[in-house]
Amino acid sequence: MNEVDVLRLVVSLIFIVMLILACAWITRRAGWLRTGGQQAIKVISSQSLGAKAYIALVEVEDARLVLGITGTQISLLHTLPPAEAGTTSVQAVTPAPGFAATLSKIMKGR
């Protein structure tokens, strides 16, 4: 193996590692790896108010909380009673499927 072959090998390995890291970053930023298990806290809805501020409607145990969220703090704005089944005006967001389900769905589409 001469120097050109070694350099080509090293550059190829660095490229592959950078590609893997870029894919992981994109996957995390896109939210494709959210777990869909039963959680004690559910974000029902959220509305952006600006660059770093938004309002979120969160369901916790037997109450719904309206939270004001900024880059530095979270404030409780209002507490709502629990939603009755079938009478809620805001539908809960269904959680994204797990990684295995997403991968199998992509592979079946080929």
Image (cartoon, rainbow, N blue to C red):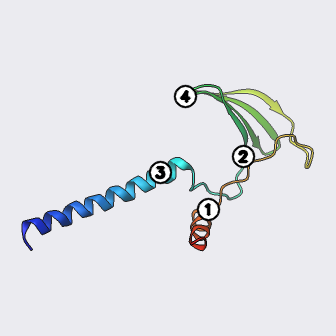
At numbered mark 4, what does the secondary structure look like: helix, strand or loop? loop
Q: Which mark is nearer the camera, 3 or 1?
A: 3
Q: Which residue is mark 4?
A: 71
> Which amino acid is tagged 2?
Lys
> Which amino acid is tagged 3?
Ile
Quadrant containing the N terminus is bottom left
Q: Quadrant of residue 67?
A: top right
3D distance between C-alphas at marks 3 and 1: 16 Å
Q: Which residue is mark 2?
A: 42
Mark toward the start of the polypeptide (3 vs 1)? 3
Q: Nearer the viewer, residue 73 or 25?
A: 25
3D distance between C-alphas at marks 2 and 4: 20 Å
Looking at the picture, does residue 31 appear above or below residue 58?
below
Residue 95: x %, y % from top left: 69, 54
3D distance between C-alphas at marks 4 and 3: 22 Å
3D distance between C-alphas at marks 1 and 4: 28 Å
At numbered mark 2, what does the secondary structure look like: helix, strand or loop? strand
Q: Which residue is mark 1?
A: 98
Contact, mark 4 vs mark 3 (Cβ under 8 Å) = no
**Horizontal arrangement in the rendering, residue 57 relative to residue 3 (left or right):** right
Residue 60: x %, y % from top left: 76, 43
Q: Residue at x 87, y 36 (%)?
A: 81
Mark toward the start of the polypeptide (2 vs 1)? 2
Looking at the picture, does residue 4 appear above or below residue 72?
below
Q: Nearer the viewer, residue 19 or 53?
A: 19
